[in-house]
Image: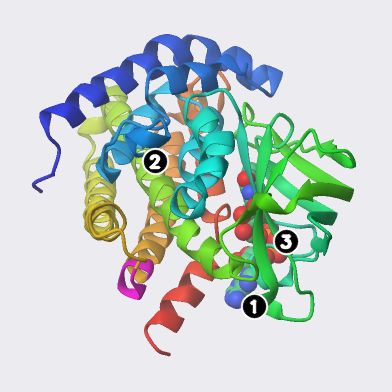
Amino acid sequence: MPTPYTEEHELFRKQVRAFAEKELRPNVDAWEKDRTFPNWVFKKAGELGITGAHYPEDVGGGGGDYWFSVVKAEELVRCEAAGVTMALLVQSDMATPCINELGTKEQKEEFLRPALEGDKIAALGVTEPGAGSDVAGIRTTARLVGDEYVIDGAKTYITNGTRADFVTLLVKTDPEAGYGGISILLFPTDTKGFAVSKKLEKIGNHSSDTAELFFDGCRIPKRYLLGEENKGFQYLMQNFQSERLIGSTSALAAAKWGLDRSVAYGKERKAFGKPIMARESWKHTFADLYTKAQAGRTLCYDAVTDFNQERYIDETDISFETVKKIAMCKLFVGDVTTEVMDTCLQFHGGMGYLEELWVARAWRDQRLFRIGGGTSEVMKYMIAKLMGW
Ligand SMILES: Cc1cc2nc3c(=O)[nH]c(=O)nc-3n(C[C@H](O)[C@H](O)[C@H](O)COP(=O)(O)OP(=O)(O)OC[C@H]3O[C@@H](n4cnc5c(N)ncnc54)[C@H](O)[C@@H]3O)c2cc1C
């Protein structure tokens, strides 16, 4: 399949790969054990221009198109810890795109630029204990009192939550108005009344931190409202597209890499006198999985082409057709990645079940993709809705 990658994209690919393999990979086993990684990773990714490659130069980015972000997602998987990758993608593609789209010059200088340069860590605060898939059910409120918003409520499962300098925060500004009463605020975490109430223990993605956040009468200036009041749901739906698309390309890259590594292993590992990869049954299994991975890539690259055109070239809103394609990517890639990782684990026999091998971590890390950023069931619900059913 022809790709739109230029020499610049390929140079960037080399740079991200070197960062992942030389600076991250040697450390990730320790970080996984520690259940965290140091903040210099955000700083270094910012300094190298990895975080902001696809943002405009006037906000501290590299001025590239969306394919730079795809290259980044494809190469970061080589650090072999999806927790680190996810934390960096939250910073670059989940908590920040809406600031670039909607932010005032001052907001971009205060929040976006330092995030892209690695001086501030960002988190996206949407999910709550009582509302995940059903975003309109959030109960964190922001009341306008004079020139300040007063925020009360809680968020959960927030990636980068224990150390974020600011949260791109979804709140109810009109609790009676459902979807039409939601807004996005840029919330500095040094605000009085804010607390990280719990660091959550997960079955995978160990090196990323995931937190419950608590807001008790937190006051922030009105100028931290992003875009217009009560349009937050609409904004978030646009922002989700970037999150889902980059998540899909990252998960798919992890799956493809897992397949390549497994096949290489199977050519060496012998059982009953010949390499296990010489068995017809495994050849067919891998033929199926490579076909599914290729189908996933075609789906993703098609959606990226549209997204890049609409967001980076036309600078329009993302069309429903592209939203549908992105939901299809997330749904399909979620299933393919889960199947690939499970098969790779099985293919390695007892070794596959050991912590010391890459496959065990990849198996549990990638399982998240069918849940985070919108579950597979919600993707089906969206696709059906967008088909007019
Ligand atoms: C490791 C991790 C990191 C995360 N990071 C972030 C983050 O940084 N920021 C953030 O805001 N959130 C984050 N999340 C939250 C994540 O996006 C939510 O968990 C996800 O959207 C699902 O919401 P929920 O957990 O409340 O599940 P629920 O909404 O309670 O869903 C429970 C089940 O019901 C199903 N369901 C729901 N609605 C429908 C429907 N209409 N039709 C059929 N089935 C349905 C779901 O598919 C699921 O199987 C993270 C989660 C995890 C686990």
Cα–Cα gap, marks 1 and 3: 11 Å
Residue 361 appears anywhere in the view: no
Q: Quadrant of ligand 1?
A: bottom right
Which residue type carries mark 3? Answer: Val
- Total count of labels: 3
Left or right: residue 121 versus residue 248 is: right
Mark sitting on residue 180: 1
Of mark 1 and mark 2, the one earlier in the sequence is: 1
Residue 288 appears anywhere in the view: yes
Mark sitting on residue 250: 2
State which region is magenta.
Answer: 319-323
Residue visible at 25% across and 25% down in the picture: 12
The image quadrant where one finds the C terminus is: bottom left
Left or right: residue 250 versus residue 183 is: left
Cα–Cα gap, marks 2 and 3: 29 Å
Give the foreground label among 2 and 3: 3
